[in-house]
Amino acid sequence: MDDQEEDQEESTRACKEAVKARIVGRSGCFYDIHVAVGHATPAWTLIRRYRDFKTLDALVRVTHSDLPRLPQRSIFFRRHFKPGFTHRFEEGLTAYVEALVSNPSTVAEPAVHHFLGVVGRIDNDL
């Protein structure tokens, strides 16, 4: 079995466990996402940019059109002068991440596993 097949097998095992993810912080254009899979694997935090969300969305929206739309990225004016824009933007990203992990068929997508850093982190005994 090659590395890619092993990663896919680990991802499939992870689907059987509850995957939890939430945005826990932001630094500039980087978002910290806390991820946990079941109880046997330690949780981890990873960093993603908005463009990572866009790339993921393009891959999974084809088969999961029920996902909430990603919030529209800001131009300078909206971000700095429109009250509450940043807060609403972050709420939109949070809703998107929650929707990703709440649907087992979405969590089963290899693109979601790569986005959440699940591949390569799951113990072989799951």
Image (spheres, helix red, strand yellow):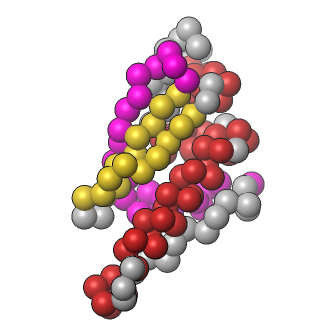
> Measured along the vertical axis of the image, is residue 95 above or below residue 89?
above
Residue situated furthest front in the rendering: 83
Decide which of 85, 111 is in the foreground and name it: 85
Q: Position of residue 62 (x, y in %)?
A: 71, 59
Q: How many discs appear?
A: 0
* Quadrant occupied by the C terminus: top right
* Quadrant occupied by the N terminus: top right
x 63%, y 52%: residue = 99
> Measured along the vertical axis of the image, is residue 122 above or below residue 50?
above
Q: Position of residue 86 (x, y in %)?
A: 37, 74
> Measured along the vertical axis of the image, is residue 96 above or below residue 110?
below
| 4 left or right of 66 in image | left
Read off the magenta span: 38-63
Q: Is residue 16 magenta?
A: no
Residue situated furthest left in the rendering: 28
Q: Position of residue 97 (x, y in %)?
A: 54, 52
x 40%, y 46%: residue = 33
x 41%, y 28%: residue = 43
Q: Position of residue 46 (x, y in %)?
A: 35, 42
In the rendered image, which quarter is residue 96 located in? bottom right
| 82 left or right of 13 in image | left
In the rendered image, which quarter is residue 28 located in? bottom left
Res. 5 visible in picture: no
| 105 left or right of 40 in image | right
x 30%, y 64%: residue = 29
Res. 35 visible in picture: yes
